[in-house]
Image (tube, rainbow, N blue to C red):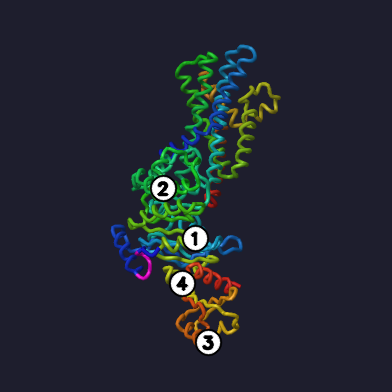
Amino acid sequence: MITAYVRLEVRRTLRDIGFVISTIGVPVMMYLLFTNLGVDDSAYKKAAMVGMAAYGALGAALSLGTGVAEDKSTGWLRQLRITPMTPRQVVTGRALTGSVVVLPAIIGVLLAGGLANGVRMDAWQWALVALTLWLGSLPFTLLGIGNGYQLTAQTTGVVNVASNLGLAVLGGLWFPISLFPGWLQTVSGFTPTNRFAELGVSMAEGTAPGWATLAVLVGWAALFGTYAAVSYRRSARTV
Amino acid sequence: MKTDPTKDPTADLATDLTADLAADRPSGEAAVAFRAATKTFGTVRAVDGLDLTVRRGETVALLGRNGAGKSTTIALLLGLDEPDTGRVEILGGSPSRAVAAGRVGAMLQEGRPVPRVTVHELVSFVARTYPAPMPVAEALALAGLTDLAGRRVDRLSGGQTQRVRFAVSLVGNPELIVLDEPTAALDVEARQEFWDSMRGYARRGNTVLFSTHYLEEADEHADRIVVLDSGRILAAGTSEELKRAAGGSLVSFDLAGGPTEWLGLLPGVSSYEVRGDRARLRTDDSDGTVRALAERDAIRSLEVTPISLNDAFLSLTAKNLEQVR
């Protein structure tokens, strides 16, 4: 039942041209642009590849929330409530959908890195980078779902764009945080996006991620998970 | 529709027949039971002490004006809302249990079509959420969608979208189907097609509850009509029973310039109106009224007609308005 639901929602998401362009096209284009304008630096190409893949995954995960808000306003969520699917199955299906639709963004940027920018890694490293970026996007999926249930369709769009840009820039997904002033670097260390990218970078460099990285990510996942659950429960009464 | 066998005076017989058709379903409990259910939004009592039973195999219309409480009644029925007080049961259990067991299908009124899926994708997804659905092709055929299966739901016309909603509500093969204003926004032809499909489904022994503010629809397609106003049931029964309850027949004649003040004093007359030179008397005892008119020789172009369901409805809701005030 959940598989059928996830299949339907994944189809719906990937048929959204706006979604495909903004979560796959834009990160790939930005990556190729940023890494080929300045000096030819292969280390930067690798780090930026992970950062942009993370950015794409972040965008895809958050825009899932826009989809939820849209479904709320079209009445689709209400229609689902009168099918035998339980509310819990619907939310789980949504979260699983999120974890599927972040994949094209991650894979798109990694392909651009490997094929166009000549980034070289062992096969297991490629697999591990993709896998960690995939798993690490869970907190953002939860944040997106929380926004979708909490807010109206219009505000969800705005909040998601703000979260997306804010978290991306602050977390250093666009520019390395070494360019930031000292205090901002400290703040950046506590953002989920920074730790998310760091997780990917450590995989790309073949080192184990630090405990602080994992702790920050788990903390945010718990926080966003609670937010998603509370928002969902609140809206389930009115949808 | 005079040829419809489910209409009075043979209604009881016909209901028995449909009940027999439904006999292979587990029976004994009512399809729908409201017991003193109340739902308040702010200061508005949307549903006010509703008592309603729908038997299995029945087709029942909830008839009422906009804001009469039809949609709230349906939301309570589907478990989308909880009653403040009282109880709502469907198929012998709570609404949410019946919904989770796949015994209910519904067509909701509000909402736009779900974006970016085809008709076939949507209907087959919904089918898979039910334990014992009908074949998707059959549901599409019943709803007249076979030729539109590959089209995207958000690119269909209003009438076609409505048919998609109908297919979604019946593909799970539910015992009870609930339709909230199913023909709103349909043109005459599409409406006729819709009711043909609905009848096909009801004939299989299923229970159908639909809301409408079209009197003719309630009259033609329901075994029983429940008139709702201000969240309460004003009357329930076959359309014949409703007409009788509202005050039997209409006697009209030309006044030929005669006086009008005695009209209300005639035997059986409950109300009257004068339009131009013609008097229209609503009466419970048309024989008595006509006899009294004949004595006064006021029989020019005399006509006795049964009141229409429209008149019955207006009279019932007007009485309620007086009581509320």
Residue numbers of the magenta segment: B5-9
Determine the secondary structure under disc 2: helix
Give the amino acid at mark 1. Answer: Tyr
Q: Give residue B243's mark.
A: 4
**Residue at left 42%, top 52%?**
B193
Whole-Å distance between the Cαs marked 1 and 4? 16 Å
Q: Which residue is mark 2?
A: B167
Determine the secondary structure under disc 1: loop
Whole-Å distance between the Cαs marked 4 and 2? 34 Å
Q: Residues within 10 Å of mark 1 (few under 14, many from 20)?
A: some
Callout 2: residue from which chain? Answer: B
Which of pointers 3 and 4 lies earlier in the amino acid sequence?
A: 4
Q: Nearer the viewer, mark 4 or mark 2?
A: 4
**Residue at left 45%, top 53%?**
B191
Q: Residues within 10 Å of mark 4 (few under 14, many from 20)?
A: many
Callout 4: residue from which chain? Answer: B
